[in-house]
Amino acid sequence: MGSRRKFIKTTGALGLTAITSKLISNEQINALETFAKLPGNDPAFTLPKLPYSYNALEPFIDKQTMEIHYTKHHQAYVNKLNETPSTNIDYMSNDATKCTHVDKTTSMVIRNNLGGHYNHSLFWQLLKPNPEGHKNPAEGKLADAIHKEFKSFEEFQKQFAEKATKIFGSGWCWLIEQNNTLKITTTPNQDNPLMKLDHERGKIILGLDVWEHAYYLKYQNKRADYISNWWNVVNWNKAEELFNTK
Ligand code: MN
């Protein structure tokens, strides 16, 4: 088992070298290494600490939703990863223990739960308590890039909200950087733009969970209201940090 794990780590390192490019930042690779430890370690996958209390995002995201989202939904992705016997994971051929290596050949249990774990770990960091609310990002390079690409911040918000609202069923809406261009893109289920699948790939700047579990208790079927209020608690400092990391 020890030598097997060593082999996996070695191939993993080679794979990381191959994908170290403009597409995926070093910080995101490091984050993936942190979130997605190899099965066999104990505990292999762990729930990252929430950087604020459950009620900290009130009134825009309610306490009960946050508590269930974090302690039940995110925890379930972590548990499922840890419960999956290593013999059922195709990482020997694919190194599917990292989102950047997930492709169509990856087992669905890994794709869904690794994506769920990664997406939520990032999502918590991209939220920030702000009881008084705000609608605009901090001044900075990201704000400049948004204005350049979308003409205005309001137009960016409009386009992002439209795409997020139109996702059929469960999924995520993302702001990504692809070849020095900002793009709004969506993925179904727990897929993300790091994965090698049939969607736009790129460096993640911002992500919004539009699964019903993210908003239904407070907003019921009114996803557009959830999105409109989510702008108030976006952590633009974190988005700026992701944008500036090469
Ligand atoms: Mn979720």
Image (tube, rainbow, N blue to C red):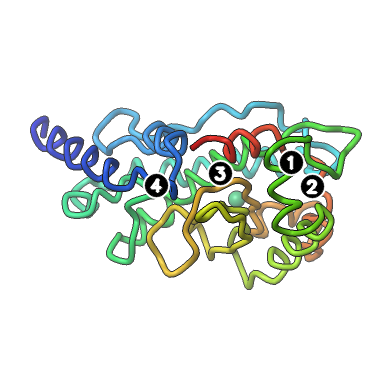
Residue labelled 3 has its Cβ within 8 Å of some atom of ligand 1: yes
Q: Check the image and report above or below for 147 versus 20.
A: below
User: Residue lying farthest left?
Assistant: 3
Q: Which residue is mark 3?
A: 120
Q: Is residue 74 left or right of residue 11?
A: right
Quarter of the image for residue 182 reads bottom right
- Residue 37, relative to residue 162: is it above or below? above
Q: Would you say 131 lies left or right of 5 here? A: right
Is residue 78 or residue 244 the one in the foreground? 244
In the image, 36 versus 161, the foreground residue is 161
Q: Secondary structure at mark 1?
A: loop
User: In the figure, 164 relative to 66: above or below?
Assistant: below
- What amino acid is at disc 3? His
Q: Nearer the viewer, mark 3 or mark 4?
A: 3
Q: Position of residue 201 (x, y in %)?
A: 47, 58
- Which residue is tagged 4? 80
How far apart are the alpha carbons under marks 3 and 2? 17 Å
Marked residue nearer the N-terminal end (3 or 1): 3
Tell me the number on the disc at residue 231: 2
Circle 2 — which element? helix
Q: Earlier in the sequence, mark 4 or mark 2?
A: 4
Q: Is mark 2 within 8 Å of ligand 1?
A: no
Residue flagged by tag 4: what amino acid is it? Answer: Lys
Alpha-carbon distance for marks 1 and 4?
29 Å
Give the label, 4 or 2, closer to the camera.
Answer: 2
Q: Which residue is mark 1?
A: 234
